[in-house]
Image (cartoon, rainbow, N blue to C red):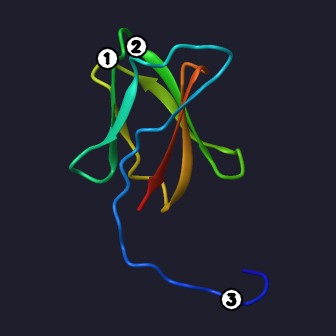
Amino acid sequence: DAGGLSDSLALFDIEVVDVLSIEGTSVNSLRIYPTLVGNYIMVTGLKQKSVYSIYDITGAIVGNADILETGVINTVYLPSGFYFLCINDKNIFKFIKK
């Protein structure tokens, strides 16, 4: 940090289950899960082709594309960090890429 302090943590896994709701949108049917292969996120509950965007902690878009009903999002291009995944401009999930 700016004060010159630092700390290190042992590696750990995070299960993403928290969902934020915007303007009363029901998100009970959508869930995201890390896959066994670390560079992918699985989205369940999609009923049709959708659009997703990934934002970094500063709010900058770092990825966006269509997502099919199979619900696989490739994050191989993302460096480690904290991100927000937005699906159809309504459903927002937070995740950490190791």
Give the labeled residue for mark 2.
Answer: 49
Give the labeled residue for mark 1.
Answer: 69
Q: Hey, which quadrant is residue 30 in on the image? A: top left
Calculate the distance from the C-alpha at mark 3 to the C-alpha at mark 1. 45 Å
Residue 37 position in % (x across, y down)? 23, 51
Q: Hey, which quadrant is residue 38 in on the image? A: bottom left
Q: Residue at x 45, y 17 (%)?
A: 50
Q: Is residue 85 left or right of residue 34?
A: right
Q: Three-letter amino acid code at disc 3? A: Leu
Residue 9 position in % (x across, y down)? 45, 79
Calculate the distance from the C-alpha at mark 2 to the C-alpha at mark 3. 46 Å
Q: Three-letter amino acid code at disc 2? A: Lys
Q: Give the class, few, some or many, for how many residues have Cα within 10 Å of label 3's Cα (few <14, many ≥20).
A: few
The answer to whether the residues at label 1 and label 2 have Cβ atoms under 8 Å apart is yes
Which comes before the other along the chain, label 3 or label 1? 3
Q: Residue at x 55, y 19 (%)?
A: 88
